[in-house]
Every structure is written in structure tokens, then in C-alpha cells.
Image (tube, coloured by chain):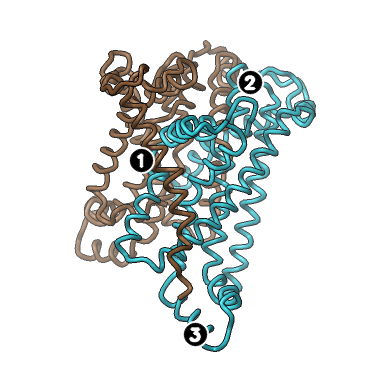
Chain colours: A cyan, B brown
Amino acid sequence: MKKAIGRIYILIIMLFLYLPIFTLIVLSFNEAKSMSVWTGFSLKWYEELFRSKIMMGAIVNTFSIAILAALVATVVGTMAVLGMAAMKQRHVNVLMGFNNIPMLNADIVTGIALMLFFLMVGLPRGYMTILFSHATFCIPYVILSVKPRMNKNTDRLFEAALDLGASERYAFRRIVLPELRPGIMSGFLLSFTMSVDDFIITYFTRGAGINTISTLIYSQVKVGIRPSLFALSTLVFAAALIVLLAVNLRQSRDDKAIAA
Amino acid sequence: MIAKKRYAAPFILWIIAGTVIPLISIAYYGFTSRDGSFTFANIAAMFRHDHMQALGLSLLLAFISTLICLIIAFPMAMVLRESKYGKQGFLIFVIILPMWMNFLLRTMAWQVLLERQGVINSLLGLFGLPRQEMMNTPGAIVLGMVYDFLPFMILPIYNTVSKIDNHLIEAAYDLGATKLGTYTKIILPLSVPGIVSGITMVFIPALTTFVISNMLGGGKINLIGNIIEQEFTVNSNWYLGSGLSLVMMVFIILSMLLLRKFDKTGGENLI
């Protein structure tokens, strides 16, 4: 009885989460522009999506910014963790306090603050300002995922390697990096997804004429939803499904490898 | 020593340029009038009737959405805790997946469903029922908020609930606790950190959103986020916009301090 109630509950939540998404997927194959009448199967909205230069440009911007921001954030964040390991706890606490600000602050405040900063220093808003802003809100996540990996032992092993005649570079590559790698990887992935998903901060820090997927959707929805956006939803959903499945499979394979 | 202080230099510079100076700029604009002199007017503008109304509505809708998310998420986390290990992984996967879809697209989905010519109304039409006006209502906005933010409530609660030792619960039963007693005395207190971080992750974005209210409120319902956004994009009054943002930040900090009081771990479960 209890189990049945649990199952029904899960089912209801799943329907709530997925019915809206599946509605979009079904409508993306609808020939008519209408949101309520099914007139036949068609791929024309996908064609319209791929023909649109603006849309393709936005997709390129989104992913190139996400990769670059995640890379910069990963390098700066990992270096910061190495640096903080040499500092007094008191100073680390202060830095971590500042590190938390972009995470805890509302996105709209972070976005506006960055926009005002760019205006004050006279930086024209565009690709670079978006990139800078994205790295700003990604760095905290990298630090939070790498920091727990760095411990006293890492340092001791590094010293031991040096004593045994390893060069600093070699010891770093063979000892420190493998210890930090899981944290670095998850920090990079987290940054990438946060960047791809961001709308609010991009909205305030972009200039006219440059779009990411999010800002383009927002401006298109304002003038009226076109079914090509349903096609985009379907593709985004499919991509998320594939990536998450791949990550999960890899993880369960790694788990098995550890268990074996 | 692998660790050298100077490795933190780029990070410190980034904090200064990306966090400290921008926050100072917002404070500067917030306390400056259009002619460049110091003023409290932009802060005091929050007390204007329309702004107070927007702030009140934001607080109300954010509170309702957070409460609904909590009521849905807690039982969900318990059900997850009690399901088999393999199935648990699958269910978590299914809950995370929508989070990976752009939230503008997810909000748009509700627009498609709720609109006057939308999916729900045409289904109603099939059964000969009258069309409903669902868009551009506070209810639509709450629905959008719950839909967008629900996973952010489920996951942290699940994280803490799944770590509760079964022996504690069995011990409670062995010592004669009722079901209700076990929930209120054992499970609920132990899941407080998850609940607190869930509330933070839902309440603050809900309080400050302007996207959901714009898309599902049709621009007719103004939340405090909409007012601030319009000051920057439509009215180009950065001074007023900054002043109102500062006041909103105070509300965010206050709600966090309030929440932290309940969570003795000090917000370590934030992610």
C-alpha cells in the first residue's frame, strides 16, 4: 500500500516535470504553426532553425563562451586553491567569503553590478564582457570543487617526490594534478553548464547585436513564439539527455572499476 | 611546498575587478542623483506605492512558490530515500535532466500550455468546456516558479535525508515512538540543513526573477525584479535601478541570515 502511494507520487511528479517538455517536442514536428491543432508531421521548423543565421550565431556564441569561461575559471580557480594552501587560515576565510558573494547574490544584482562596472570603466559591452562576467560567476564553483581535494597529504607527497629527485614540473604533473583532477573536472563541467544556462547575467552584460541562445529565446518569445523554438527545445533536450547519460555511464563504469 | 601564495594573485585580481568594484559601482549609483550629488532618494524610492506593491507581491509569490516546492519535495525525497539503490539513481537522473534544459524554454512551455489559444484550452474545448484565462495571472507565475525551481528543492533535501542512518529511525520505533513522533523528532530535525539550502535556492531566485513574471505575467504583473530591470533597459535610470537593487540585496541578506539561524552547519550543503 505504502509502496503504491510512493509510486503514484513519483508518477505525478514525473508527469509534472515532463509533460510540458514533451508538449514542446510533439509541437516541434507539427506542420501547422498553431499550438493547438495537429495537421501533420513535418520537419520544416527544424529547417527554419538551421537556416537562421542569427540562431546559428547564438549557438556558436553560447558554446564558445561556455568553453572559454570554463577554461579560464578552471585555471584561475585551481591556481587560487594552490595559492590558498600557503596562506594563513584567517586570510583564506576572508578570500572564501568574497568567493561566496557571486554564488549567494541574486543574478540580477550580479548582472547589474557588472554592467555598471563596464560602463564606468568605459568598456564597450560585447563578447568579451560576457566572457569576463561568466568567468566571474564560474570561478567560485571551481574553487569549491577543487579545494576539498587539496590537503596536507598532497603537499607531503609533492615534497617527497622532490626529495627523490623529481623536478617541480614533473612532481606537479605526476603527484598534484592526479590528486586534484576529479575536482578540476567537476569544476570545469559545472562552470560549462552554468555558463550555457545563464540568461540574467548575459542579458545585462551583453551589448546590442550579440546574442546567446538564452537572450535570443527571450527576445523571440517577446514578439511571439515561433515553432522553430520548439525545434530548438527538442534539440536542447536531446543534447542534455545524451550528455547526462554519457556522464552517468562513465561514472557507473568508474564505480565498478573501483569496486573491482 | 607546492603551494605558493602568488598563485592566488589572478583570483584576487578577479575578485577585485569582478565582484568588489562592481558592487561598489552599484552602491555609488544607488546613492547618487542624476546631477551627481549624494542622495538617499533612490533608496527611499522603494517606499513609493507602486514599488512597495511590487515588492510585497514578489515576497508573497516567492513565499508561496517556496512553500509549494517544499511540500512537494519533502515527500519526494523520502520516497527516493526508500526506493532501491539502482532505481534511486535513475530517479535522480530524471529529476536532474530538466534542469539541464534552458529555463527560458521550460518557462515558454508553460506559456504554450496556458495561453488562450494554447494546449490546455484546446483540450478543454474538445470536451466542450469553456476556455479559461490562465495566462497573465499570479497563479501562472507561481506555477512557472514551482516548475523551474522544484529540482533545486528536491536535490538538497534528498542529499540530507538519504544520509540519515536507518538505525536511528529503527531505534525510535523500538523505543515506542509513533510514526508522527519519528518524523517530527528524528527525520525532520536531521533534514533541516537540506531544507534550509533548498529554501535558499528557491526563494532567492523566485524573489528576484523578472523573466518568469514577464513571460507568464504578460508584462502586466510587476514584480520587484521587473521594476529594476525596466529602470535599466526601458527608463535608463541607473541611479534609481541601483538604489532599488541595493534595497533588494538587503532583503536577500536578511532572508539568508534568518535561514542560517535554523541551520547549524553554516550552509555547507549549499551545493
Alpha carbons under labels 2 and 3: distance apart: 62 Å
**B53 or B130, nearer to the observer:** B53
Q: Which residue is mark 3?
A: A160
> To which chain does the residue with label 2 belong?
A
Residue B33 as seen in the image, left or right of residue A255 = left
Residue in view at x 62 percent, y 36 percent = A127
Residues at circles 2 and 3 in contact by the CB criterion of under 8 Å: no
Q: Nearer the viewer, mark 2 or mark 1?
A: 2
**B208 or A232, nearer to the observer:** B208
Q: Secondary structure at mark 3?
A: helix
The label shown at residue B70 is 1
Lower sequence index among marks 2 and 3: 3
Residue B167 as seen in the image, left or right of residue B176 = right
Is B70 located above or below residue A146 in the figure?
Answer: above
Q: Position of residue B245 (x, y in %)?
A: 36, 28
Q: Position of residue B39 (x, y in %)?
A: 27, 22
**B104 or B45, nearer to the observer:** B45
Q: Quadrant of residue A75?
A: bottom right
Q: Quadrant of residue B168?
A: bottom left
Residue A126 in view, yes or no: yes
> To which chain does the residue with label 3 belong?
A
**B65 or B79, nearer to the observer:** B65
Residue B204 as seen in the image, left or right of residue A248 = left
Residue type pointed to by label 1: Leu
Alpha carbons under labels 3 and 1: distance apart: 51 Å
The label shown at residue A225 is 2
> To which chain does the residue with label 1 belong?
B
Is B23 located above or below residue A175 in the figure?
Answer: above
